[in-house]
Image (tube, rainbow, N blue to C red):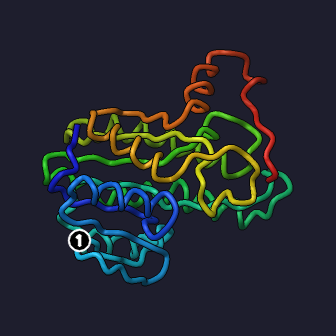
Amino acid sequence: MVAVQGKVVVVTGGRRGLGAALVDEVLARGAAKVYSTGRSAFTDDRPQVVPHALDVRSAESVGALARAAGDAEIVFNNAGILHPGSLLGGGFDDLTDTFDINVFGPLRVARAFAPILAAKGGGALVNMHSVLSWLGGAGAYGASKAAIWSATNSLRSELAAQHTQVVGVHAGFIDTDMVSEIAADKMSSAEVARRIVDGVEDGALEVLADDLSVDVKAALSGPVENLSVTLPV
């Protein structure tokens, strides 16, 4: 378990949505400094927040962040993208962009920060998955979240020797711009952020942020044809 109080934290995609809520939450719990990233340069008036432009598709951009945040102790891999479209009918450029941002992006960040976390005694790496990691029918987005779920499980094994707490987060629909066009019950980003940080501080390896995620995980042992969802993709 890793307490946030006094720690240096990185939140990718921290400019808005769940990322912004995570920044607010760790500050409320006494984080000493928060590196918050966005796709382009931005400002934040809070003295504990260090804004940083980041393109997770670029190894050079990720490397620049790691050099700037060499004191990081907790990393939230939150940056992501949702392109509409099915696996068969959607644009292939959108499909590859989805995997580059949602899968390879977090992996680039993990590879860059693993030695930094090791030097701090292990720290924590938190990857954002989705309930759609376990459900078919969500196009490239769901497939990418299934892939990062698998990658997180492998990273947990690979980082165990350096005592890094690797946390995978599953959540249903969160009230952010990303899913504003989808008609569904949504949790507030502040509540999801609270549950995520609770999990980190409690030593959890997995956070199921809502009842939907709990129910779907419980159904994984059942018939595969039950693991699907219909979304406007």
Q: Is residue 79 left or right of residue 34?
A: right
Residue 110 location in percent, x, y? 36, 54
Image quadrant in which the N terminus is located: top left
Residue 88 location in percent, x, y? 84, 52
Residue 30 location in percent, x, y? 20, 56
| Numbered-mark total | 1
Residue at (18%, 50%) from the top-left corner? 118
Compared with 15, 132 (above or below) is above
Which quarter of the picture shows residue 108? bottom left
Between 19 and 150, the residue placed more toward the observer is: 19
Question: Which residue in the protein does label 1 denote?
Answer: 48
Compared with 163, 32 (above or below) is below
Q: Is residue 63 visible?
A: yes
Which quarter of the picture shows residue 71? bottom left
Q: Residue furthest right?
A: 89
Residue 15 location in percent, x, y? 45, 70
Q: Is residue 25 left or right of residue 212?
A: left
Helix, strand, or loop for circle 1? loop
Compared with 17, 131 (above or below) is above
Tell me the crowding category of disc 1: few under 14, some 14 to 19, or many 20 or more residues within 10 angstroms, Cα based: some
Q: Is residue 146 visible?
A: no
Compared with 229, 119 (above or below) is below
Q: Is residue 183 left or right of residue 48?
A: right
Q: Label 1 amino acid? A: Gln
Residue at (39%, 46%) from the top-left corner? 194
Which quarter of the picture shows residue 112? bottom left
Between 178 and 187, the residue placed more toward the observer is: 187
Residue at (23%, 71%) from the top-left corner? 48
